[in-house]
Image (tube, grey):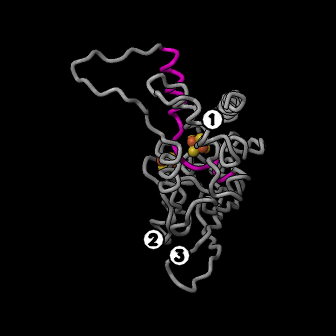
Amino acid sequence: MKNRELTLNIFRYDPNIPGREPYMQPYSLQETEGMTIFIALNQIRENQDPSLKFDFVCRAAICGSCGMLVNGRPRLACKTLTRDLPEVITLMPLPVFKLIGDLSVDTGSWFRQLSIKTGAWVHSDKSFNPNCQEERMSNETALKIYEAERCIECGCCIAGCATANIRDDFLGAAGLYKIARFMVDPRDERPEEKYFDVVSSEEGVFGCLGLMACEDNCPMELPLQVQLAYVRRKMALIGFRV
Ligand code: SF4
Ligand code: FES
């Protein structure tokens, strides 16, 4: 492999400095074997510019911290290889989320308000008895919950979603996926009508324009549209009853 000279054009902005305008800053570096955007950014920060802000924790597509727009598409920096990109690469922060600085955005607050809004915990009136045997669950149900738990809350589906970009109350694919997770969980005693109040509006399932960007951009390749159709079907059925 012939290693290339890469140019990374990176969005720079510090919202905490009054009067400071955003700008694009170019950095050059030599591509190496197996280089990811994450590795490139670390090299820039270590060797060229310690002031560059971006987020990461795991480097292994697990924590969901390193989402950013890579040549206009929401991607995880740690999962995106430079060899799959042209020599000139543009990096911008994810839209929708509050900008902390440069490529760093606050996805945590966004997902926290989503969890509160959707009641993303098992709702049960049962009290915990440590002497009881654990409740059993079929493998099939456990697998469905496991699948629905694979979201790493990176925000790529939200950043690429047309509705989320124009409505800040839209739950987005990640929110509807979260709802589906509790709908399939037999320990959650919420009647389906309870979900109706949260998701059966333009903020929820009916705000989706069906453009599929969420699924195209999800680094975990989650079946977002399938789950969305599941929630939408359930809501339509309940809609006939209420
Ligand atoms: Fe990221 Fe996929 Fe979860 Fe959206 S659904 S937050 S793209 S892992
Ligand atoms: Fe954790 Fe990229 S650093 S997902």
Between label 2 and label 1, give the one nearer the viewer.
1
Image vertical order of residue 143 relative to residue 180, above or below: above
Upstream in the sequence, badge 3 or badge 2?
Answer: 3
**Amino acid type for the residue under numbered disc 1:** Glu
- Name the residue furthest bottom: 19
Residue at the (28%, 27%) spot, across then down: 128
**Amino acid type for the residue under numbered disc 2:** Pro
Please indicate whether residue 127 sits to the left or right of residue 84 in the image.
left
Tag shown at residue 221: 1
Ligand 1, by image quadrant, is top right
Task: Return the x and y of residue 186 as percentages of the image width and height.
Answer: 48, 22
Q: What's drawn in magenta, residue-wise?
A: 139-160
- SS for dot 3: loop
Decide if residue 219 is in sight here.
Answer: no
Task: Return the x and y of residue 55 as percentages of the image width and height.
Answer: 48, 58
Tag shown at residue 50: 2
Q: Is label 3 in contact with label 2 (beta carbons under 8 Å)?
A: no
Between label 3 and label 2, give the one nearer the viewer.
3
Q: Residues within 10 Å of mark 3 (few under 14, many from 20)?
A: some
Q: Residues within 10 Å of mark 1 (few under 14, many from 20)?
A: few
Residue at the (46%, 45%) spot, across then down: 63
Q: Residues within 10 Å of mark 2 (few under 14, many from 20)?
A: few
Q: Quadrant of residue 86?
A: bottom right
Task: Return the x and y of residue 172 as percentages of the image width and height.
Answer: 64, 46
Tag shown at residue 14: 3
Q: Quadrant of residue 71?
A: bottom right
Tag shown at residue 4: none
Q: Main secondary structure of the magenta part?
A: helix
Task: Return the x and y of residue 184 as percentages of the image width and height.
Answer: 54, 25
Spatial distance from mark 3 to mark 2, Cα to Cα? 14 Å
Upstream in the sequence, badge 1 or badge 3?
Answer: 3
